[in-house]
Image (cartoon, coloured by chain):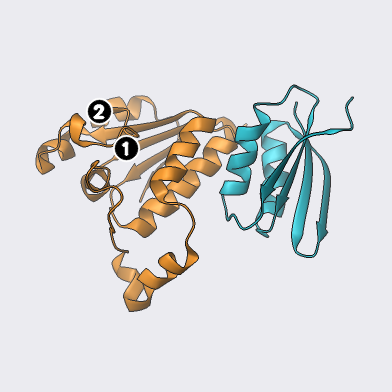
Amino acid sequence: MADTDTLSLVLFSGTDDKLNAAAVLTAGGAAMGRRVNIFLQYWALDAFRTDRIHKDHGVAPEAGPEGHGVLQRHGGQHWSEILGQAKGIGEVGIHACSLSMEMFGITKDDLDPLVDDVEGVASFFLEVDGPVTFI
Amino acid sequence: MSTQIAKTLDLKGLSCPLPIVKTAQAIKQLQPGELIEALATDPGSVPDFNAWSRSTGHELVEQTEEGGVYRFVIRRR
């Protein structure tokens, strides 16, 4: 059955709108009984730093001048809380890209505990059994 | 089989995916066969509860709407 496939997400963008969309997909997938496998690269990884995770990360360029307000008016939970809940109901792995860690000068201790471990591309693909979605 | 509601969840005001996420969390505390009632206002919860029930095997026993509040009764499998 298709719903047993792993949901594999590569998070690249570090803006709150994209991270929120990814968190919603993750929690939905976990609730449906799907394993979720997340790889954090570049700006998304940077947003998971303990000292920055709750800061305002802005919105994607396509949002335009009105975009920021849309997200704030809607309210709702922060994407980090949604991810925490997703971990509570299902099998959700969040992995930091080792190359991005090096580029940004980030160590595992700098990252929020939501992040399980540091992986390379090969070890990430070890857990991929279907398509990979890049956000 | 039990017809008594073992637990009621007030999910009014929450938006996708939280109604499903909170229900998935809460149903773990129930015994198989027990019923949980979920009250939500998110219109997306109607297709979501149906899909979630199909995917997880927890039976959607009842589904009603009154005054913009959707009520779902689910039996833990």
* Mark drawn on residue B73: none
Chain assigned orange: A
Q: Is residue A6 visible?
A: no
Location of mark 2 (residue)? A119
Chain assigned cyan: B
Q: Position of residue A22 (x, y in %)?
A: 42, 49
Q: Nearer the viewer, residue A22 or B1?
A: B1
The C terminus of chain B, quarter of image: top right
Location of mark 1 (residue)? A39
The N terminus of chain B, quarter of image: top right
Q: Nearer the viewer, residue A52 or B61?
A: A52
Residue B62 as seen in the image, left or right of residue A33: right
Q: Position of residue A58 (x, y in %)?
A: 29, 63
Q: Callout 2: residue from which chain? A: A
* Three-letter code, disc 2: Glu
Q: Position of residue A122 (x, y in %)?
A: 26, 27
Which residue appears at 53% of the width and 40% of the height? A29
